Image (cartoon, rainbow, N blue to C red):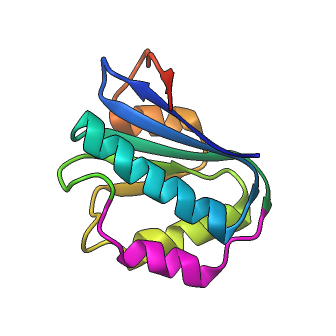
Amino acid sequence: MGFVFEYDAKNKILRGIVQGQLTDEILREAYTAAENLVASKGPCRGIWEFSGVTKFEATSSVIRELAHRAPIIPPGYMRVIVAPQTFVFGMMRMMQILGEKTRPELRVVRTLDEAYQLLEVKSPEFKPVS
C-alpha cells in the first residue's frame, strides 16, 4: 500500500505511516519524502509508524544505507519508531544502533501510546500532508 504523512502543527510532530508491504524501494521513497517535508515545515519531532506493515521485504543493506544517511530530523529533536512486529522491531533496532552517533534521540517502541509518552504528547492533532 505504501506510506502517508500526517503533521501535528500544535506539537510539531511529523508522522510517517507505512502500511502493507514494505520493500527497499518504499523505504527509500518514504525517507526521501520525509526529508522534503521536514525541509518545508522546519525542525520537528517525528514518528515512523510501522504498525500497518503486513509484509516486510526491506533488506538489512537498505536499513544500513539509511542509517548512514544524514538524519531527517536534526539533532535535539526526539524521533520514535513504532514497530509492534518482532522482526520489524529488530530491523529498526538495528537502524537505531547503526545511527546512534547521528540520531541519539531515536527510540524504537512497540506501541503508538509508548511513542506519545516519550514525546510527552497527550492529545495529538494530526492532519494529512501531501
Question: Is 79 rendered above or below residue 7?
Answer: below
**Drawn side of residue 15 relative to residue 104, left or right:** right
Q: Which residues are magenta?
A: 56-71
| Quarter holding residue 116 | top left
Q: Residue at x 55, y 58 (%)?
A: 29
Question: Is 14 rendered above or below residue 108?
Answer: above
On the image, the x and y values in percent for residue 4 come to 59, 38
**Drawn side of residue 41 relative to residue 33, left or right:** left
Q: Residue at x 35, y 73 (%)?
A: 69
Question: Is 92 rendered above or below residue 80?
Answer: below
| Quarter holding residue 14 | top left
Q: Foreground: 67 or 107?
A: 67
On the image, the x and y values in percent for residue 79 come to 36, 48
Tell me, yes or no, whether the highlighted magenta stretch contains residue 121.
Answer: no
Q: Foreground: 83 or 37?
A: 37
Tell me, yes or no, whether the highlighted magenta stretch contains residue 66.
Answer: yes
In this rendering, the count of numbered labels is 0
| Quarter holding residue 119 | top left
